Image: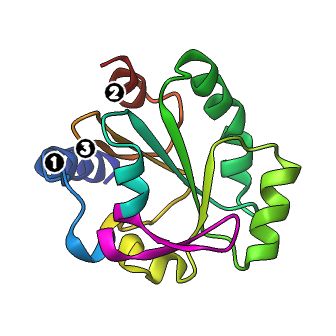
Amino acid sequence: MKKILYTLAIALGVLSCGDDPVQFNEAALNDTFTSLNGDTVTLKSILETHKGKNVIIDIWASWCGDCISGMPKVKALQQQYPNAVYLFFSLDRDVASWKRGIQRFKVEGEHYFLPKGKKSAFGNFVGISWIPRYMAINKAGEIVVYDVIEADDAKLVKALKN
């Protein structure tokens, strides 16, 4: 039985390769986030601010043990690739928890809160099933890493090297 499940898992992995989007859809681009100072901003405006730069998106929450235990790897990436932009999109339950988490865990980068969380247009586009979740956007504005859960994943590092 294990052999069948293993074979099925590999087959599904092979079939799903290459299906990852390279651009955000309009709904995701127009989705609204809350900035640290309380402004409402769209994903499109956030990305336009960083046009021509490599961007790493870290989808996280302060209540997420895996997110917190993965922060040293994120900080190592930031030290090794300081010219990249690091965006932190929070799935915290409320703004106060989000802001406390940033302070408590000393998370450095640009921070945005998803008021509708996983049920937002961005959340639906990304299909968030696990956090932390990392994505990479290249200098041309293309999604080059769509779904990794470790900040030291070889795909993420490769995207930063390019």
Quadrant in the picture for residue 155: top left
Residue located beneath label 2 in the image: 159
- Neighbour tally class for label 3: few under 14, some 14-19, many 20 plus, Cα within 10 Å: some
Image location of residue 74, percent across then percent down: 62, 33
Under mark 1, the amino acid is: Ala
Magenta residues span: 29-44
Image location of residue 9, percent across then percent down: 26, 50
Which mark, residue 160?
none
Q: Nearer the viewer, residue 157 or 78?
A: 78
Point out the image quarter for the N terminus.
bottom left
Looking at the rendered structure, the secondary structure element under dot 3 is loop
Q: Between disc 1 and disc 2, whose residue precedes?
A: 1
Q: Between disc 3 and disc 2, whose residue precedes?
A: 3
Image location of residue 94, percent across then percent down: 73, 79
Q: CA distance from mark 1 to mark 2?
A: 26 Å
Residue located beneath label 3 in the image: 141
Q: Are marks 1 and 3 in contact (CB under 8 Å)?
A: no
Looking at the rendered structure, the secondary structure element under dot 2 is helix
Under mark 3, the amino acid is: Gly
Under mark 2, the amino acid is: Ala
- Neighbour tally class for label 1: few under 14, some 14-19, many 20 plus, Cα within 10 Å: few
Q: Are marks 3 and 2 in contact (CB under 8 Å)?
A: no
Residue located beneath label 1 in the image: 11
Q: Nearer the viewer, residue 3 or 97?
A: 97
Q: Is residue 52 left or right of residue 8?
A: right
Residue drawn at (73%, 44%) of the image: 107
Q: Is residue 152 left or right of residue 26?
A: right
Q: In this picture, is 58 found above or below 113?
A: above
Q: CA distance from mark 1 to mark 3?
A: 30 Å
Residue drawn at (37%, 33%) of the image: 53
- Neighbour tally class for label 2: few under 14, some 14-19, many 20 plus, Cα within 10 Å: some
